[in-house]
């Protein structure tokens, strides 16, 4: 009995202990000192010498970068000044930051280096051009002067050039029919074929003789052009979009052209790009009949005259800008080259739009009446001559987008409209087949 009661007490005690939370007793662990194998443990100790070497390499790299930048600024200070002036319309002033001659001699050293490199690369350029000539001979055969001495078994159909008053909208259709007739490569192609003459080499090319008179005008006042004539296209990024369309249309009727258009250029900053000098050099070298100018988007800014800024549109500003226009026209007329000066269209930016109206008045004033002419583009690119429009309504009532999102440049439709406007100034040849 006693044993039974004892067992009950023990069972009751165990049940109470099971209900109570258990207490965890952490017994201290005695760490025994044992011998440690040194090969099994890697001890990292600071190495002052390695840290010094890393820091030293960083400083060396920084020194090289600083020296390279200093050399770049020293050699290209004038180019950087001109770029900053043209793009930011502010003076960077690198050429004036140090008055010592040794600093300012960097630009001269750079020019001499460029000239030396150009001389060194001339032989490679000549080899490249001769390879292209050989490639053209393989593709198209000998040039006309050499091939004319060879007898052929079958006579080729003759080609005749018939001049007619042709609207600009019909140029492409006539050119397409002409392309089917002409079996010879045109002297002006997409850029691969070169015009070869009998016995001529690259280093024998000489400037063409200038014109002795202006190209004639027909009864409607259009400039009469033929295969012997060449059209020079110059201007800013507006002309860059239009020039390829004009050049292709002229090429299709065997009238040559040269496209010198270049973005971010104008007449306000001749230090960045001197259009009067470039045009003068080109007219003296090539036999140009008509010069087409289209610029103004980069000219509605202050000028730097005598080292000081002259606000846009002032009397002095307009006088200097007008002089630059007149210098181009005078140079062209001295070479018996007619000028077509395209006015700037309405712009989608208020400041530029106000500015181009001033520029257009100066263009029109400089051209006046005579051998050359000013043509307005505002009517062709807007339903309202005095307002900017992104779209225009054509004769069939269809709305066409003619301007890009930047409010300055043109879509393909806008470019072709301006192309037709230029071509309307010409009477172009029509090539037709004559029966043998």
Image (tube, grey):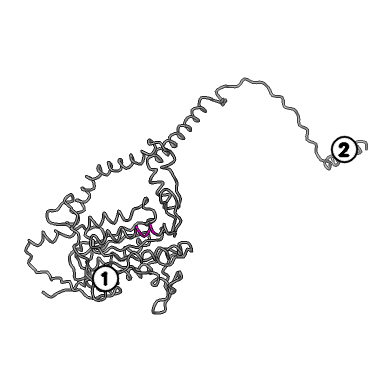
**Residue sitting at x 45%, y 34%:** 61
Q: How many marks?
A: 2
**Residue sitting at x 29%, y 67%:** 372
Among the two numbered marks 1 and 2 on one chain, the one whose residue lies closer to the N terminus: 2
Horizontal placement of 15 versus 156: left or right?
A: right
Residue 323 coordinates in the image, percent (x, y): 35, 58
SS for callout 2? helix
Q: Report the magenta stretch's main SS.
A: helix
Near-viewer residue (249 or 363): 363
Horizontal placement of 171 versus 212: left or right?
A: right
Q: Name the residue under label 2.
A: 10
Horizontal placement of 134 versus 238: left or right?
A: left
Residue 135 coordinates in the image, percent (x, y): 19, 54
Q: Which quadrant would residue 411 be assigned to in this image? A: bottom left
Q: How crowded is mark 1: few (under 14 residues within 10 Å), some or many (20 or more)?
A: many
Please state, as top left, top right, bottom left or bottom right, where the C terminus lies in the image. bottom left
377, above or below 322, in the image: below
Q: Which quadrant would residue 95 be assigned to in this image? A: top left
Q: Name the residue under label 1.
A: 426
Residue at mark 1 to residue at mark 2: CA–CA distance:
124 Å
- Which numbered disc covers residue 270? none
Q: How crowded is mark 2: few (under 14 residues within 10 Å), some or many (20 or more)?
A: few
What range is drawn magenta here?
A: 319-324
């Amino acid at each position: 009995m006693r044993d039974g009661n004892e067992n009950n007490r023990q069972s009751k005690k165990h049940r109470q202990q099971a209900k109570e939370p258990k207490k965890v007793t952490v017994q201290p662990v005695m760490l025994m000192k044992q011998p440690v194998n040194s090969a099994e443990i890697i001890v990292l100790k600071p190495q002052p010498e390695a840290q010094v070497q890393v820091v030293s390499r960083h400083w060396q790299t920084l020194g090289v970068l600083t020296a390279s930048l200093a050399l770049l600024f020293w050699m290209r200070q004038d180019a950087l000044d001109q770029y900053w002036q043209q793009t930011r319309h502010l003076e960077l002033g690198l050429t004036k930051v140090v008055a010592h001659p040794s600093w300012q001699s960097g630009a001269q050293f750079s020019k001499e280096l460029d000239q030396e490199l150009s001389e060194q690369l001339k032989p490679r350029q000549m080899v490249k051009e001769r390879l292209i000539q050989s490639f053209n001979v393989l593709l198209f055969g000998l040039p006309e002067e050499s091939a004319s001495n060879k007898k052929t078994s079958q006579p080729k159909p003759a080609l005749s050039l018939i001049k007619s008053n042709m609207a600009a909208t019909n140029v492409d259709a006539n050119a397409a029919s002409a392309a089917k007739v002409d079996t010879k490569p045109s002297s002006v192609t997409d850029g691969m074929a070169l015009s070869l003459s009998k016995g001529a080499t690259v280093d024998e090319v000489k400037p063409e003789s200038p014109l002795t008179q202006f190209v004639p005008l027909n009864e409607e006042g259009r400039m009469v052009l033929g295969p012997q004539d060449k059209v020079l296209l110059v201007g800013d990024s507006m002309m860059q979009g239009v020039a390829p369309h004009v050049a292709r249309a002229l090429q299709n009727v065997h009238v040559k052209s040269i496209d010198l258009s270049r973005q971010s250029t104008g007449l306000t900053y001749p230090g960045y790009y001197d259009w009067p000098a470039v045009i003068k050099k080109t007219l003296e070298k090539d036999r140009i009949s008509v010069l087409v100018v289209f610029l103004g988007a980069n000219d509605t800014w202050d000028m730097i005259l005598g080292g000081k800024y002259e606000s846009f549109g002032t009397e002095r500003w307009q006088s200097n800008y007008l002089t630059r226009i007149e210098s181009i026209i005078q140079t062209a007329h001295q070479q018996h080259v007619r000028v077509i000066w395209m006015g700037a269209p309405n712009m989608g930016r208020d400041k530029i739009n106000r500015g181009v109206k001033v520029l257009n008045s100066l263009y029109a004033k400089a051209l006046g009446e005579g051998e050359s002419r000013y043509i307005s583009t505002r009517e062709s690119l807007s339903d309202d001559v005095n307002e900017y429009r992104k779209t225009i309504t054509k004769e069939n009532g269809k709305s066409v987008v003619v301007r890009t999102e930047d409010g300055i440049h043109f879509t393909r439709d806008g470019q072709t409209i301006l192309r037709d406007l230029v071509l309307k100034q010409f009477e172009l040849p029509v090539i037709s087949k004559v029966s043998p």
